[in-house]
Structure formats: structure tokens, C-alpha cells
Image (cartoon, rainbow, N blue to C red):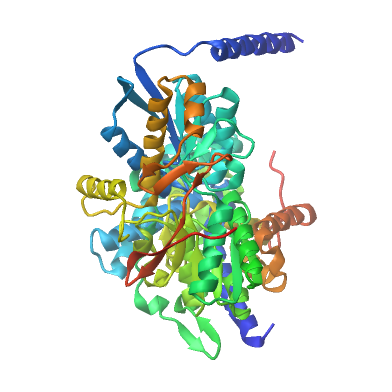
């Protein structure tokens, strides 16, 4: 393998990995606070991408504005989903909310098929994100450079919210003990709604980035990235924001490198991701940067 | 124990019900009942929708046969193998159809065909091109050619017209159509003196092909053959363009869709794919194709028909033709008449059903030129 080719693979891996990281942050945040694996995350991700497309082509909004509006609308959708599907189950066993989230996932997917139709749509991309930079034999999409930076900034922002603000304090309290938090005067439902709002905004941001990288919108576009990001989140230690970023990057790099070094195995790279998940769960159930599990009785 | 007994009773009742349903004679009423199962949602919806439009248009033009009204029963197979088998079961058992049309997608047709074969109801496949769909089946037919033929057509065009010597393949491992067609292309290409320099794979649903494409680019092929569906194909071509690929990209009939330019943009410029011998940009059409194109444009202003719509139309018309010749709606009689179809003039050319129940017709070549689909050649490949 030539040096140029290796560097090209490295850039491809960086883009894919940081996209996984971006999606995984949203997964892990909701889990960290509510101990709920929100399977509808992939569908919220898909909605975010569609909303931008609508804003740009139907309402003729400038790109920047369309992105902001889409993130806001998706965020509200997330809050709505919490209100309708999760809040009534707040005191039910955790498994009920998990199953409810699977239901929401299927519902949103099929709703999208009915409303948007299953026919894929093209994404119009602003030129400055996609005009290829050529360095020697390596070709870099400007987006490749934007996504890791964005993932990193969002990670920092999120850490700031969780550890340095008052609602963040509430989130951490809820993650420890929801009942006691309520007794201590934490507005539990409002804080959880905020958590879903932020989680969905993150999903929208990653959906938009994904659609810019792989410019096609489909109602099922969130399924595979959702699974992969879930693996990344578990791999990095679900609940840990830094872990999600690390897990995403490692998964992306490994997926690309397995094709680069063992091209004949390219068809099985998804299987590889799931094998990775199984191994991690067996060897270190809490993931790379995960906290120790505490059994709550 | 009690549970076991209950379950046993339930199973017996269910089996008895099935037997009764199976043994029931066809209701001799005054309609001809045709079931249509197609992917109207999911991954293959863009093809299924067009084929349904074609079937519906044919139904409007020929709403009756043998003096009876033809009734269509349309079921969505959701681009899913299991749903596909369920769909056929439903139209046969509940709607009591005399014949079945469908489907787009070889994997789906195999799943559905199995059910129709067991029930003894004739089925006409629209665009399922994998040989396995009709092999060893008495009741399964199709209006399209099969992949060994199509693969040979693509290889012939690549070598004779494009002067290709080295080819690469990028295949979806989870798709019967893709695996089959890639294999047949490889066989013909190497037989004609070409060399396959890279064989890369991916999985249905993947959206990142950069690693595979980087590997392929390093092998410097003249042609990359992608037996993909058009949405996936468009993403592959976009990423190939971003990675600076300079080879010619070719595909099969699953790439034939009027939206390909809209979805692929300038990344699909110069793309070549094999298809059935019909395209609205074709110069010398037969009268049926000309009438079909005109009627379609009248019905769908601003939208061109494509080969899927044409095959949907042809499958209905061929079935009606068979029912007419059979003189009855008895599934056995229809099956016999379908097997005897000779030189039936469809939109996609003269159709003759051969002994393996496949339609024999030449391979068409379409190229995307200046942002438009153009029918560039018709070839009769040698196997």
C-alpha cells in the first residue's frame, strides 16, 4: 500500500469515525442521565436531515438558517416524543421505556415513508463543504475537516452543560436517583425534557452532517448509522461523553482499515462491528471509559 | 400440561382451517382476479411504484378479458423477503386470485414464487432477473431476460465498445441479484479475454464506500461494474467522483430509473448500464412501445416512463393474452397458455417464453449523456 493511499484511507476513516462519534454523543447523553437506550435516536437523526432539506428546497431558506431551524424543530420533536412516549412510563420498569423507544422508532420510520415517500432524495450541498481539496494524490472533502472539529466542540459544550450549569446539576442528580431528586426540588420532568431536547438537537446535527457526507435522504437512513453509533457508545462506555467520541473514532477507523488491509473481507465489515460489540461486552462490560456499574435495588 | 393441550387443540383447528381453505374450489364468479405484489415501500419502492403504474395503465387499456371484468388486488411486499411470501399467500388464499404478477427484485420474487408454485397459481415476474427465480418451477414465468444474458451483454459492450481490458467489481453480498449478476459479468468478461483486477464487497444498507473505492482506484481498472440498485449506485458514483476515480462505471437494469440524474447529479454523467430493450429515448420503437410512451406522457405530464413501467405493462398484457388463449380462468389452463407464448409484442420487444420460462429478448444499453438518459445500443450477446 502506497503512503498516499494509506493517508487517503486515514482521512476516509476520520470522516466516518467522527460521524459515528457525533451520533454516539446523543445516544450516550440520554443514556447517561436516564439509563434509557433511546432506539428512536436514528429516526430523530433522519428527521433532522429531512427538515434541512425541506428548509432549503421548499422554504428557500439560506443554508445556515435552514440548519438552525431544522435543529430547533427536531429538538422540539424530541421533547414531544418524551412527553408522549416516555414520560407516562417514568415510574414503570426501565424495560418499558426501552420497548416504547423501539415503538417510537418504527412509528417515525413508517410515518416518514408515508409522508416523505420511500423514494430517495438528493441533498443539495453548499460548495465550500464539498469542493475537493487535492494534496498530492490525496483528495480531501472539506467536510472531513469540519466534522471532527464539530464533534469535539459539541463534546466540550455538552460537558460544560452537564458539569458547569444548574440544569446540568439537575441532570446529574437525576442520573443518580430520580426519586430523591424529585424530593429535593429538582424539576424532574423539565430537566428530562431538556435532556431529550439537547439529545435530539445532537441527533439533528449529526443527521445533517451525515446527509452532507452521503448526500441522499431516505426514511430508513438512520437505521444502520444508529446501530453503529450505538455500538460506538457501548464500546466507549455508555454514559460517558468522551467515551462516545473515542468509541466512534475507533469504530470508524477499524471499519475502514479492515477494508484497506483485508479487502476480501470488505463484505463483512458490519459483522465485524457487531463482533467488536460482543467482545467488549464480554471483556469489559462498562466499555473503555465507562463508570463502574452500580446495582440499584 | 394444560397449556400443551390447549396449544395442540389450537394447532389442529388451525390446520383444519388451512386444509379447508386449500381445498376450496375457485369461486366461479364473473371477474378475472389478478394479484399484484410489488415493493411499494422500503428499499426497492422506486422500482415497485413504477411497475405498479405500468400494470395499472395496462389494466385501464384492457379492463376485461373473456367478457369478464379484470379485478386487480395490489399488495405491498415492503422490499422484504418474508413480507413478499406473506403477500403472495394473502392474495392467493384470501383474494382467491387466478394469477399473480410480480415482482421487482429477484430475492423478493424467489420468496413469493415459492408460495405461488406450491399453490399452483401462475405467476408472471416483472423485472426479477436472477435465473433461480424460475428454475425448476412449473408455474413461474417472467417478462424479462435473465442475468447470465445481461452480464454477457454488459461484458460485450465493455470490451467491444469501450475497449476495456481490466475490470473491477463492487457487489452487495446480501443481495441475490447483485451476487448473481456480478458473477455472470465476471464469467463473460474473462471469457472474452478481459481481466478482473479487483473484487470488493459491501452489505445492503451501507452508505460509506470510500474504503472499497480507494482500494479499487489503486488497481486502476478501465471499468467498474456495480450491479447495484439505483439509489445506492448514485451514492457509490458520487463517492467515486470525490475520490477522483477516472474509470468508466457500468451497472445493470436495476440502475434504470428516470430519477437517476436528479439523484446522482453530475456524478452519473457518462454512466452506462444494461437494460431491457426499451427506453423513451429509443429511436426505432415498435408500435406498442410508441403507443405506450405517448399514453404514459399524457397520463404523467413531465415524467418519462422507464423500463420498469414498461415491464409492468408487458406482464399484465402477456397474462391477459394467455388468459385469452386459454379461454378460461383455470390456473392450469393459464399456465399452459403462458408457456406457449410466442412472439408476443410488448413494449420491451417481441417476447417468447423459452423452456426455462424466461423471456428471450436482446440487451439494451443506456448511457447518461448531458444529464439525460440515452438509449445507445441494442446487443445480442453470445453466452
**What is the tally of numbered marks visible in this picture?**
0
Vertical order, B184 against B193 (above or below): above
Q: Nearer the viewer, residue A186 or B380?
A: B380
x and y percentages locating residue B125 in the rendered image:
49, 39
Vertical order, A97 against B291 (above or below): above
Residue B269 can be seen, yes or no: yes
Q: Say whether residue A242 is left or right of residue B76.
A: right
Q: Quadrant of residue A98?
A: top right
Q: Residue at x 54, y 34 (%)?
A: B140
Residue B245 can be seen, yes or no: no
Q: Nearer the viewer, residue A28 or B341?
A: B341
Q: Residue at x 38, y 32 (%)?
A: B321
Q: Say whether residue A54 is left or right of residue A275.
A: left
Q: Quadrant where the C terminus of chain A lies? A: top right
Q: Nearer the viewer, residue B325 or A272?
A: B325
x and y percentages locating residue B345 in the rendered image:
37, 43
Q: Quadrant where the N terminus of chain A lies? A: bottom right
x and y percentages locating residue A37 in the rendered image:
58, 47
Q: Nearer the viewer, residue B242 or B337?
A: B337
x and y percentages locating residue B6 in the rendered image:
68, 9
Amino acid at each position: 500500500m502506497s503512503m498516499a493511499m494509506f493517508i487517503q484511507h486515514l482521512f476516509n476513516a476520520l470522516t466516518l469515525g467522527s460521524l459515528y462519534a457525533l451520533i454516539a454523543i446523543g445516544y450516550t447523553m440520554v443514556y447517561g442521565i436516564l439509563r434509557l437506550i433511546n432506539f428512536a435516536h436514528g429516526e430523530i437523526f433522519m428527521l433532522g436531515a429531512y427538515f434541512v432539506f425541506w428548509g432549503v428546497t421548499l422554504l428557500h431558506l439560506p443554508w445556515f438558517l435552514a440548519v438552525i431551524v431544522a435543529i430547533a424543530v427536531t429538538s422540539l420533536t424530541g421533547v414531544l416524543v418524551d412527553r408522549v412516549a416516555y414520560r407516562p412510563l417514568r415510574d414503570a420498569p426501565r424495560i418499558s421505556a426501552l420497548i416504547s423507544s423501539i415503538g417510537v422508532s418504527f412509528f417515525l420510520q413508517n410515518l416518514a415513508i408515508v409522508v416523505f415517500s420511500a423514494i430517495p432524495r438528493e441533498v443539495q450541498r453548499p460548495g465550500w463543504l464539498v469542493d475537493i481539496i487535492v494534496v498530492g494524490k490525496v483528495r480531501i472533502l472539506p467536510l472531513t475537516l469540519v466534522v471532527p472539529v464539530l464533534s469535539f466542540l459539541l463534546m466540550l459544550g455538552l460537558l460544560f452543560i452537564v458539569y458547569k450549569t444548574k440544569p446540568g446539576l439537575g441532570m446529574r442528580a437525576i442520573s443518580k436517583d430520580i426519586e430523591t431528586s424529585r424530593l429535593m426540588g429538582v424539576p424532574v420532568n423539565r430537566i428530562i425534557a431538556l435532556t431529550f431536547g439537547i439529545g435530539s438537537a445532537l441527533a439533528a446535527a449529526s443527521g445533517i452532517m451525515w446527509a452532507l457526507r452521503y448526500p441522499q435522504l431516505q426514511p430508513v437512513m438512520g437505521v444502520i448509522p444508529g446501530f453503529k453509533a450505538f455500538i460506538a457508545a457501548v464500546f466507549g462506555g455508555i454514559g460517558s461523553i468522551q467515551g462516545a467520541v473515542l468509541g466512534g473514532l475507533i469504530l470508524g477507523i477499524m471499519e475502514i482499515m479492515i477494508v484497506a488491509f483485508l479487502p476480501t473481507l470488505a463484505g463483512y465489515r458490519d459483522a465485524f462491528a457487531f463482533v467488536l460489540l460482543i467482545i467488549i461486552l464480554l471483556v469489559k462490560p462498562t466499555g473503555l471509559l465507562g463508570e463502574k456499574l452500580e446495582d440499584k435495588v | 400440561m394444560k397449556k400443551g393441550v390447549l396449544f395442540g387443540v389450537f394447532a389442529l383447528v388451525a390446520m383444519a382451517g388451512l386444509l379447508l381453505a386449500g381445498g376450496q374450489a375457485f369461486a366461479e364468479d364473473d371477474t378475472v382476479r389478478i394479484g399484484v405484489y410489488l415493493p411499494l415501500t422500503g428499499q426497492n419502492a422506486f422500482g415497485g411504484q413504477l411497475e405498479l403504474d405500468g400494470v395499472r395503465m395496462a389494466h385501464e387499456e384492457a379492463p376485461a378479458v373473456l367478457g369478464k371484468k379484470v379485478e386487480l388486488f395490489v399488495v405491498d411486499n415492503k422490499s422484504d423477503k418474508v413480507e413478499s411470501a406473506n403477500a403472495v399467500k394473502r392474495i392467493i388464499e384470501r383474494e382467491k386470485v387466478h394469477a399473480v404478477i410480480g415482482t421487482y427484485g429477484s430475492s423478493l420474487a424467489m420468496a413469493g414464487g415459492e408460495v405461488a408454485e406450491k399453490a399452483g397459481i401462475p405467476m408472471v415476474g416483472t423485472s426479477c432477473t436472477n435465473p433461480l427465480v424460475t428454475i425448476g418451477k412449473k408455474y413461474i414465468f417472467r417478462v424479462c431476460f435473465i442475468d447470465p444474458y445481461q452480464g454477457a451483454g454488459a461484458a460485450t459492450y465493455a470490451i467491444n465498445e469501450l475497449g476495456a481490458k481490466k475490470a473491477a467489481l463492487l457487489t452487495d453480498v446480501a443481495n441475490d441479484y447483485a451476487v448473481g449478476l456480478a458473477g455472470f459479468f465476471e464469467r463473460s468478461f474473462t471469457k472474452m479475454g478481459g481481466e478482473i483486477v479487483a473484487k470488493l464487497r459491501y452489505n445492503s444498507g451501507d452508505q460509506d464506500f470510500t474504503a472499497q473505492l480507494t482500494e479499487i482506484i489503486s488497481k486502476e481498472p478501465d471499468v467498474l461494474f456495480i450491479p447495484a440498485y439505483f439509489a445506492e449506485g448514485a451514492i457509490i458514483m458520487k463517492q467515486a467522483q470525490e475520490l477522483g476515480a477516472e474509470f468508466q462505471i457500468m451497472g445493470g437494469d436495476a440502475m434504470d430509473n428516470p430519477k437517476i440524474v436528479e439523484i446522482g447529479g453530475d456524478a452519473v454523467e457518462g454512466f452506462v448500464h444494461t437494460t431491457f430493450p426499451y427506453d423513451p429515448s429509443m429511436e426505432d420503437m415498435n408500435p406498442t412501445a410508441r403507443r405506450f410512451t405517448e399514453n404514459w406522457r399524457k397520463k404523467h405530464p413531465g415524467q418519462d416512463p422507464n423500463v420498469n413501467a414498461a415491464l409492468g405493462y408487458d406482464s399484465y398484457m402477456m397474462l391477459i393474452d394467455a388468459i385469452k388463449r386459454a379461454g378460461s380462468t383455470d390456473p392450469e389452463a393459464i399456465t399452459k397458455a403462458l408457456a406457449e407464448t410466442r412472439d408476443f409484442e410488448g413494449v420491451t420487444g417481441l417476447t417468447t417464453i423459452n423452456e426455462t420460462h424466461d423471456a428471450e429478448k436482446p440487451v439494451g444499453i443506456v448511457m447518461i449523456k448531458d444529464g439525460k438518459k440515452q438509449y445507445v445500443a441494442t446487443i445480442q450477446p453470445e453466452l
